[in-house]
Each structure stands twice: as structure tokens, then as C-alpha cells.
């Protein structure tokens, strides 16, 4: 099929607020940048696929998209409320998919959502919150028209794969910090601020695991269920996404275990340091107890004390106290208390 070139008037970027990109494709090549009001007419053309990307649209824009593709009201309502769990729902011949996105912001994991509408000849993405732009996905798909020509289910795969790939930089950053903490606590007692950081990291990792866990079921349905929008030839690609999500889950579990071990190790290190200090204090107290006891005996108010009038008694007593203290010091050093 001969693909017409983009008219000059259609090569300008879409300026509607909330619309990131809107294009019509034939055989994997973009033939037009379109307005939302033109989407249904472009979709109706044989062999055409409309791909629209929205970012935090208002209800008016969602209503315009709903009108163009006859989207279900419940799906539109969900897309307008960015507090959904990952899921996949079928409305007639169309699918509505929710996926959670994640980014690392100031040391904390920030979450967002992507809502995807997919039907015959169209795919619409709606991004909310912390999320990387899908411009990179569009550019990568457009650079390989043969792959993009597979249709809207391939675009769906590319977006889900991109979402899962973006979990890795978040985990890599956390993993580096986890390794630093692990190395530190083996030789030092951690501070209150570090304990709070350990807790925050574990909580963020748990939130991330809860956010991506249901995505396994979404990909499983895309892989196994007989959904009209997913051709059998594409199901193996969604299997790859499923494996990737499970790998991310394993990495999260591994890091949470390391953080738990780091916290336990820090407690053991702290207890060991406290025990060492207690041993030193007990050793010095035992050493000081000898002269204290002897001085106490000779300080008692008795008239007759043995060797009280002996000329060398002072030197003998002091020498015996010194020998006793040195003996105790040597003994405690030998057993490692000093």
C-alpha cells in the first residue's frame, strides 16, 4: 500500500491541552497527526490504526474521546479517577486496562497510573501521576514499521513492556542504597535516621510489589484468554512481559529480605557493642574492688588490727593490692574483656 506523506497542515503538533500525541497509522507508518474530533473518521478507514496519548485529561477531553470510540461510561469514569488497581476489563469488543507506573522522586517511590483503551483500529493511553512519557515508545515503534504494522495489540504490548522496564531504574537505585546500608551495618551501629530510612525503603518496596503484583494477572489474561483484541501470534509477547514482572517481584522480595537482615544485623552489632562495653566496665569494677576492699578493712574502727604496728605493712599491703589488680587485668585481657 502506498502511504501518503503528511500534509504540511497535519505535521504540526497537536496543541489541545492534555493531548500528548494523536496519530493515524497505516502499515506501521504514521500518515497523519489528527485532532480528537477526527479520530473516528480515521479509524473507519480500512487498514488504519489510531493511536492517541493523553496526559491527565479533564472530563471534557475524556468525553470527546468516549464519543469518538463509543467507550463504556464505567471505563471513562475509572480513567478520570486515578486511584485504580491494575486490572483488565472487557466491554463488548473493547478492552480497558490499568497499569501502575513508578518513578524515584527525592529518594521515595512515586506512583502513577496508565489507563489503556484498546479496540478495533484504535488505542488510547491516559497517564496520571508519576509516569515517563510514552514518546519513546511511539518513536521506537515508528522506527520499526514492520513491527508496528502488527496492529493495536502490538502497541499494547510495547506500552506494557515499557512500563515494566521502567521499574528497573527504580530498583537499581534502591539496590545501590541497600548495598551501602548492608556494608555499613556490618561494622557500625546505625543511627535513628538510618533506621527510619530502612523502614521507608521496606515500605516503598512493599507498595511497589503490591502495585505491580496484579499486573501478572493482566498479562496472564492477555496471554491465555481468547480476547478479540489480542491475536494468538501476539500472546507469546505478553508471556515475556509476565516473566519480566515476576522477575521484578523476585528482585523486590530479595531486597526486602536484605533490608530485614540489615536491620537485624544492626541490632546484633549494637548488642555486641553494648556487651563489650559492659564487659569492660565489669572488668574495671572488679579491679577497683580489690583496693577498695583492702582500704575498707584497714579503715574499720577496730583497736587491734594485725600488723598495724609493723614497719613495712604499708608497702606489703600496697604491693599485694598492685599484684592483685595486675593479675585481674592480665586475666581480663586474656579472655578479651579488656
Image (cartoon, rainbow, N blue to C red):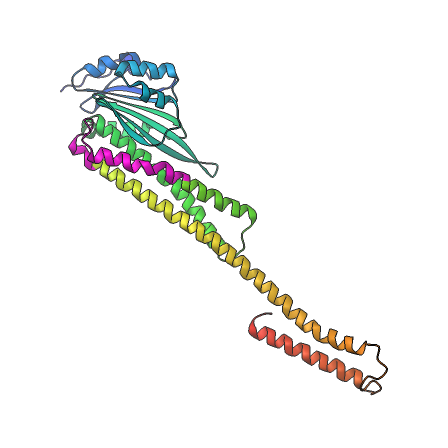
Q: Is residue 266 visible?
A: yes
Q: Left or right: where does residue 325 sit relative to residue 172?
A: right
Q: Is residue 15 visible?
A: no
Identify whether 105 is placed above or below 259.
above
Q: Main secondary structure of the magenta part?
A: helix
Tell me where residue 85 sits by quadrant. top left
Furthest residue in direction left, as rendered: 1
Residue at 37% x, 29% y: name it.
Answer: 84
Vertically, is 90 above or below 293?
above
Question: Where 83 falls versus 192 (above or below)?
Answer: above
Residue 111 image offset from top left, x and y in percent: 41, 33
Q: Is residue 229 magenta?
A: yes
For residue 162, what is the image quadrant? top left
Which residue: 35% across, 40% down? 168
In this picture, residue 274 sits left or right of residue 161: right
Toward the viewer: 199 or 185?
199
> Which image quarter holds the C terminus?
bottom right
User: Where does the magenta region start and end?
Assistant: 207-236
Amino acid at each position: 500500500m502506498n502511504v501518503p506523506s503528511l500534509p504540511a497542515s497535519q505535521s504540526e503538533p497537536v496543541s489541545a491541552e492534555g493531548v500528548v500525541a494523536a496519530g493515524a497509522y497505516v502499515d506501521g507508518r504514521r500518515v497523519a497527526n489528527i485532532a480528537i474530533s477526527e479520530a473516528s473518521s480515521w479509524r473507519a478507514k480500512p487498514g488504519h490504526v489510531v493511536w492517541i496519548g493523553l496526559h491527565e485529561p479533564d472530563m471534557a477531553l475524556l468525553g470527546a474521546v468516549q464519543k469518538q470510540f463509543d467507550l463504556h461510561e464505567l471505563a471513562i469514569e475509572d480513567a478520570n479517577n486515578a486511584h485504580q488497581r491494575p486490572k483488565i476489563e472487557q466491554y463488548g469488543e473493547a478492552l480497558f486496562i490499568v497499569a501502575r507506573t513508578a518513578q524515584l522522586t527525592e529518594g521515595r517511590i512515586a506512583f502513577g497510573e496508565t489507563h489503556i483503551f484498546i479496540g478495533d483500529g484504535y488505542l488510547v493511553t491516559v497517564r496520571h501521576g508519576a509516569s515517563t512519557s510514552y514518546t519513546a515508545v511511539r518513536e521506537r515503534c515508528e522506527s520499526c514499521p514492520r513491527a508496528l504494522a502488527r496492529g493495536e495489540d502490538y502497541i499494547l504490548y510495547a506500552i506494557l513492556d515499557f512500563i515494566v522496564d521502567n521499574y528497573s531504574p527504580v530498583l537499581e537505585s534502591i539496590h545501590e542504597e541497600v548495598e551501602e546500608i548492608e556494608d555499613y551495618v556490618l561494622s557500625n551501629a546505625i543511627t535513628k535516621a538510618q533506621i527510619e530510612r530502612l523502614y521507608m525503603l521496606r515500605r516503598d518496596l512493599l507498595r511497589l510489589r503490591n502495585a505491580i503484583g496484579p499486573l501478572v494477572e493482566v498479562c496472564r489474561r492477555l496471554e491465555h484468554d481468547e480476547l478479540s483484541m489480542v491475536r494468538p501470534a501476539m500472546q507469546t509477547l505478553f508471556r515475556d512481559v509476565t516473566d519480566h514482572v515476576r522477575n521484578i517481584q523476585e528482585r523486590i522480595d530479595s531486597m526486602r529480605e536484605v533490608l530485614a537482615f540489615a536491620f537485624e544485623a544492626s541490632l546484633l552489632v549494637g548488642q555486641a557493642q553494648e556487651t563489650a562495653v559492659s564487659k569492660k566496665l565489669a572488668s574495671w569494677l572488679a579491679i577497683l574492688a580489690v583496693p577498695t576492699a583492702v582500704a575498707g578493712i584497714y579503715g574499720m574502727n577496730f583497736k587491734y588490727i594485725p600488723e598495724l604496728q609493723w614497719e613495712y605493712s604499708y608497702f606489703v599491703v600496697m604491693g599485694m593490692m598492685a599484684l592483685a589488680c595486675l593479675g585481674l587485668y592480665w586475666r581480663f585481657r586474656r579472655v578479651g574483656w579488656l
